[in-house]
Image (cartoon, helix red, strand yellow):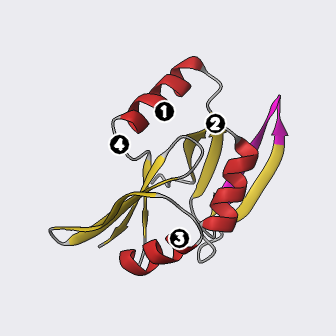
Amino acid sequence: MMKIIVTSIFVNDQAKALEFYTEKLGFVKKKDVPAGEFRWITVVSPEDQNGTELLLEPNNHPAAKEYQEKIFADGIPATMFAVEDVREVSKRLMDKGVKFTMEPTEMGKVTIAVFDDTCGNLIQIVQQ
């Protein structure tokens, strides 16, 4: 059996991303170690600190930067996070200055919203 332990998201500024993902979104820093000219920075959900880690990976490779820029320009979220109440979470994030590109929208049995993480990504939140 395999288990997903780390997934990554490209960011254009690791320090800014760490601040956004911890201070605005409420994730907890799990790892922050030097990795060459960059850092290996992961964050986790405060409710599951031994769960899947999100790696804030620098987009310094030209293919990574191009991929990130193109999906952002096309309005495609880079990843998705589950929340209990999309409307409540969206309001709380908007109160912290987070900019949404899609306000809470019902799509069948789920409600979704999309925001800009200020580091080159659109992030979707979903209530199932």
Q: Earlier in the sequence, mark 2 or mark 4?
A: 2
The residue pinned by badge 4 equals: 76
Q: Earlier in the sequence, mark 3 or mark 1?
A: 1
The residue pinned by badge 3 equals: 93
Q: Which circle marks residue 12 in the picture?
A: 2
Q: Which circle marks residue 127 in the picture?
A: none
Query: Residue furthest toward the left?
Result: 108
Q: Main secondary structure of the magenta part?
A: strand
Tag 2 and tag 1, C-beta contact below 8 Å: yes
Tag 2 and tag 4, C-beta contact below 8 Å: no
The residue pinned by badge 1 equals: 68
Kind of residue at badge 2: Asn
Q: Secondary structure at mark 4?
A: loop
Q: Is residue 54 left or right of residue 89?
A: right
Whether residue 21 is situated above or below residue 91 in the rendered picture: above
User: Where are the magenta residues, as a range?
Assistant: 34-43
Where is residue 26? Give x, y as percent: 63, 70
Regarding residue 85, the answer to whether it shows in the image is no
Q: Earlier in the sequence, mark 4 or mark 3?
A: 4
Q: Secondary structure at mark 2?
A: loop
Kind of residue at badge 4: Ile
Q: Earlier in the sequence, mark 4 or mark 1?
A: 1
The residue carrying pointer 3 sits among few (fewer than 14), some (14 to 19) or many (20 or more) residues within 10 Å by Cα, namely some
In magenta segment, residue 40: yes
Where is residue 103? Give x, y as percent: 34, 65
